[in-house]
Structure formats: structure tokens, C-alpha cells
Image (spheres, helix red, strand yellow):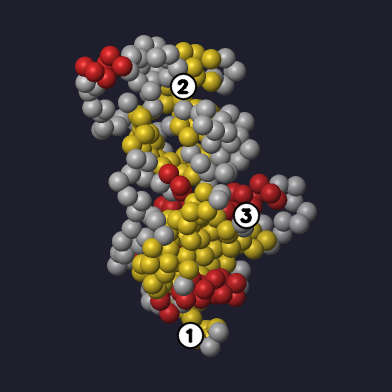
Amino acid sequence: MSEIVVMNGVCAGTVFLLPDIPTVLGRSPESHLQIGDPWISSMHAMFERRGDEVWVIDLESRNGTFVGEERVGEARLEDGAMVRFGRTEIRFTARSSWTPPPRTPREERIRPDAQRDTIRSDGTTSARAPGAHAPVAREPEADPYALALRPVVVLRMSLHAVRLASSPDAAARVRAAVDAAARAALDEGAMVGRLASVGVLALFGVTGPGPDDAARAVHAARTARGAVRRLGGVDLRAAVDAGPLLAGNAMGPTGADVTALGAAADRCERLAALALPGEILLGPGAAGAAGEGVTQRELDGAPVEVLQDG
């Protein structure tokens, strides 16, 4: 049986086992896998097995289904694929190592297998055959991303339009640029949130500080800058700093949002706003993380390292 692991947001850490029948993911209680992300449609996407393969099919969702950085109508999922619905990212595993515990004789008597209707992409329904397993959700023991005071490296990235005013595909380029920046940070192990529609907030060390967190943040910023520039018409401003922050998922009426509060976060926000297009500024908490090739500048009365092209 395959499984998906929710990587961020309100359901972070939850594991859903996928049965061999079409399974709908969405925000509605009527979906088989319910995730309370307001950017997820009521019936957002469907997982379907085709032979030995698992496919994800977008159900005409408002905010789209993405496999990696590509928005898809439907796509075959490779083992380990990262899929995004709204602001929620999941990791697909082709074969789960977990098996459900056997039912007791009493459970067999009072919980007989029942039919379950599944919504298909063509609008028809198919019933679950007797004996087929329904999706199983395993709740996490504790949310490692819960809001807490901890030492964190924070990376802020924002887009700068170079020549998009008259471009007919400006909106698509902006979305692709934000997705590319977010992917660069995710690939380095960051906890990632989007800032409105033109920026990314990435936190390193939320589940435990690492000696190379600042270096990984700088590497993510460099990778994001290159990816954004390749799209054309857009550049990136970025800043990295570190310190004790109230950081993690902040629960609110619209779900979970990545949050960082504290002096280092405020300083990083100011530096990102002061950065020139293409610059990556390193605050005092991240000094030395870029190695060689940096220059010094004084901003807000404090020395700042500037990492430019190269």
C-alpha cells in the first residue's frame, strides 16, 4: 500500500495510507483525505492506481496541483515525489512500511466492510469492493513544527520585476518564480511559507539546529536566484539572519502559517527590503556563512555582508 506524508501546515506529520481505489483529497468533510488548508479546494485532487502506478489527477482545483515545480492536470507519481495542493506539500511513498493492526473478533462483528463511493474524474462513482482498505490516517505524536521559541536561521526572498509590465504571461512567471524560490528552500530542508504572492519565508533548524543551517540558507538563496533569473523578467532580493525566534506554525482562523517573530526576523525583513535586485544580504547572525566572495556594507548602522553575482 502506498502512503503520503503531509510535510507542512495544519496536518504536518500526518500519514495517510492510500488504498487501491480512487481516493479524493480536499478540504471538504466529504473528501476521503481531508486537509483544512483554505487554499485547497473542497474536492481538490484524486489519487488513482493504474496497474502498478499511482497517478494524481487535479479535479479542476482553483489553485492547482503541482508535482515538483510543474502544475499538472494529471501525473504519474515517482517514489519520493513532492506534490503541492494549495499551500500544503506532501511526500509520496510508493510502498508503505506500516501495516494496520489486525481487528479483534469483536471488531469484525461490529465493523463489517462497507461499500464506499468514490468520485471519479468523469463524474461517475465506483464502489469500494468488500475487503478493500479505506484510507487510514495516523496522527502525529507531536507537531515538531509547532510555534515555539528556538534558535532559527531565517531566509526571506522577494521578487523584483525587471521587465514584466507588458508581458502577457506575467502572472504565470510570477507564480513560477515564487514556486522556484520555495522549492530551492525546501530542497535544503527548510520549513517554507509564502509571503503574499511575491515572496518566500524559509526557516532552518525548526526541528533542531544544525551547524550548517546558515550555509544551507545561503545556498538556497543562490539556487533560488539562479532559478528565478532563468524564467526571465524577474530577479530576486534575499536576506539571511539568525537568532532566537518565536518560530513555527501559528494556528489561526485560516489554518497554519509559517511564522518567525523576534529581533533576527525583524532585521532580516529590513535587510531583504534594502537589498538591491540580485543581492543576498547576510545579517550578523549569519556572518561568514557564504565563505569567500562577499563585500561589506553598513545598513541600519550595522555591518552587513553582501553576496552578489558569482
Tell which of 286 and 194 is nearer to you. Answer: 194
Residue 190, position as x, y percentages in the image? 41, 57
> What is the number of the mark on residue 22?
2
Callout 1: SS: strand
Q: Residue at x 37, y 41 (%)?
A: 14
Q: Earlier in the sequence, mark 1 or mark 2?
A: 2
Which residue is label 1 attached to? Answer: 303
* CA gap, disc 3 and disc 2: 32 Å
Kind of residue at badge 3 = Ser
Q: Residue at x 69, y 49 (%)?
A: 171
Q: Tell me, yes or no, whether the two marked residues, 1 and 3, touch with CB atoms within 8 Å.
A: no
Is 298 positioned to the left or the right of 196 in the image?
left
Q: Residue at x 43, y 13 (%)?
A: 115
Q: Tell me, yes or no, whether the two marked residues, 3 and 2, touch with CB atoms within 8 Å.
A: no
Callout 3: SS: loop
Which residue is label 3 attached to? Answer: 197
* CA gap, disc 1 and disc 3: 30 Å
